[in-house]
Each structure stands twice: as C-alpha cells, then as structure tokens.
Image (spheres, rainbow, N blue to C red):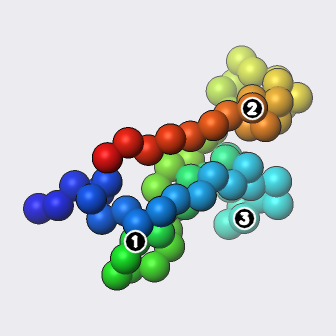
Amino acid sequence: MKKITDKLKSFEYDKNRNGIFGIKSGIVWGKFSNQGTSPILYISKPKHVSQEDFELLLDKIEIIIRK
C-alpha cells in the first residue's frame, strides 16, 4: 500500500475564514493525482487560546509536507 505522501500531488493551506462546511478550523487540502482534492488536516483552536491569538497563529503558520 502506498503512503499518503506518495499519492499526494500538491497541497494548499486554507485559513478557512469563511467557515466552509461549518468548520471553524484551518484546513490543509490535498490534491491527489487520481482522486481530486480533499481535506487532509484540520487545525483546531484549543480552548485555552483566544480567538484573536488563534487568528494570529493561522496567519503566521507555514506548512511543509516532506515526502
């Protein structure tokens, strides 16, 4: 069975400011060569972090997926 990183063609980080699908989390979308695009990671706000700080963290985050 192939690892997900082998099947992943590209990815995109979405801060999800519009709350797509009713989800408040940041989303990492994966584009797969044969299956289209789907979410592969959600970045949720912990209860102890304020919404303002969470928004700041979403703005500052950089994601790299190593194969």
Task: Pick whichever, 1 or 20, lies toward us.
Answer: 1
Horizontal arrangement in the rendering, residue 45 relative to residue 35 (left or right): right
Task: Pick whichever, 57 or 63, lies toward us.
Answer: 63
The quarter in which the N terminus is drawn is bottom left
Q: Is residue 43 above or below residue 47?
A: below
Q: Residue at x 50, y 73 (%)?
A: 37
Would you name the residue on which mark 2 appears? 60
x, y percent for residue 59: 79, 37
Q: Secondary structure at mark 1?
A: strand
Q: Amino acid at mark 2?
A: Lys
Camera-side mark, 3 or 2: 2
Q: Residue at x 74, y 55 (%)?
A: 16
x, y percent for residue 45: 68, 33
Q: Amino acid at mark 1?
A: Phe
Q: Earlier in the sequence, mark 1 or mark 3?
A: 3
Would you name the residue on which mark 3 appears? 20
Contact flag, marks 2 and 1 (Cβ < 8 Å)? no
Camera-side mark, 1 or 3: 1
Horizontal arrangement in the rendering, residue 7 relative to residue 65 (left or right): left
Q: Secondary structure at mark 2?
A: helix
Q: Residue at x 68, y 66 (%)?
A: 21
Mark seen at residue 32 = 1
| Label 2: few (<14), some (14–19) or many (≥20) C-alpha neighbours in 10 Å | few
What is the distance, in whole Å, between disc 3 and disc 2 at their CAs? 21 Å
Task: Pick whichever, 54 or 6, lies toward us.
Answer: 6
What is the distance, in whole Å, between disc 1 and disc 3 at their CAs? 20 Å
Horizontal arrangement in the rendering, residue 18 relative to residue 8 (left or right): right
Residue lying at the far right of the rendered structure: 52
